[in-house]
Image (spheres, rainbow, N blue to C red):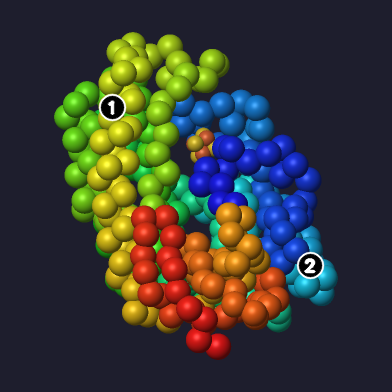
Amino acid sequence: MFIANLDQAPDEFEGHFVRKSSFSAWVPIMYGCNNFCTYCIVPYVRGRERSRSKESILAEITKAVAEGYKEFTLLGQNVNSYGKDLGLTYAFSDLLRAVDAIPGVERIRYMTSHPRDMQEDLIKTVAESKHICKHFHIPVQSGSTRIIKAMNRSISREAYLKLVKLIRSYVPDAVITTDLIVGFPGETEEDFQDTLKLLEEVDYDVAYTFIYSKRSGTPAASMPDQVPVAVKKERLRKLMDVQNVHSLGRNKRLVGKTLEVLVEGPSHNNPQVCSGRTDGNKLVLWPLGNKQYEIGSKVKVHIDRAQTWLLKGSVIE
Ligand code: SF4
């Protein structure tokens, strides 16, 4: 399961190591948030940012590797702020490099990364690393600078596009995904068109789309010009229609390529089919035949077909 937005994560994250599966684990590296996006309740309920010590994180991952875990997702509401509350000069990219160096760690993911705070050093670290997935989840929420400002997200559309360009300059095949909210208070048709244009410009692999809904106690809940539900639904439909074309297009570019896939086990829908995920978190299915694949092992899959949400192929080794 991929939680696009950590705001949806369960409270168990307030503990440490959380088993996602027998080979994959979530590792909270910090709690809380200082950002106060105007639609979000998290800073009010989870408090200000608190980072765990790097020693405790690295020890936990080392122990988990010994127990057979291979994939680690480092969690925080804004991982780019890691260590700032501790007064450390040790940045999130330093932590990533340290995890990358732990023998036995096969894949490293992280979320969530506020695009305003994503620095070149982090992108460079991902590009140069052996095990950090070349997947950048950078939630933009809207394509309109005016709406992004009303959301208190503190990044302009132009700065965001510059960031995308920088990511692609270091990692040309990067999988780039985002979160988008439609119908934020005051969102005009022109603002919405800016969001649609952003989808065209970035060519995201996936956009996780949400309809704005009021969270009481947040500034946005009492903002004027709330968007009617029918308009929000129509905008969401249009957004998904445009994004689906891009998701399919991005997946089609992988047809004919051989990708490394981490085995997750038989598909939930069809036990004759095995499933796994690429470095870019794309779901891949292939026929099991009479073979057995160890969960958490890596296989090479030749991609034969692409759909909007998944890839189909055949194992070549
Ligand atoms: S960065 Fe914004 S959306 Fe994310 S948890 Fe913090 S306040 Fe909420």
How crowded is the residue under tag 2: few (<14 C-alpha within 10 Å), some, or many (20+)?
many
Q: Position of residue 219 (x, y in %)?
A: 46, 18
The Cα–Cα distance between marks 1 and 2, rounded to whole angstroms, is: 46 Å
Taking the image as shown, residue 165 lies to the left or right of residue 257, namely: left
- Which residue does the image show at 57% across and 67% down from the upper left? 273
Front one among 260 and 142: 260
Residue at (50% x, 62% y) in the render: 283
Looking at this rendering, what residue extends furthest in the bottom direction? 317
User: Which residue is identified by label 1?
Assistant: 234
Residue 279, position in %: x, y?
A: 50, 70
Whether residue 119 appears in this view of the structure is no
| Residue under the point 30% across and 47% down | 243
Q: Nearer the viewer, residue 179 or 244?
A: 244
Tell me where residue 144 appears, x and y as whole percent: 25, 36
Residue 177 placement (x, y as % from top left) = 40, 54
Which quadrant would residue 197 be assigned to in this image? top left
Residue located beneath label 2 in the image: 64
Q: Quadrant of residue 17?
A: bottom right
SS state under label 2: helix
Total numbered circles = 2
- Look at the picture and state if 79 lies above or below 101: above
First in sequence, mark 1 or 2: give its number.
2
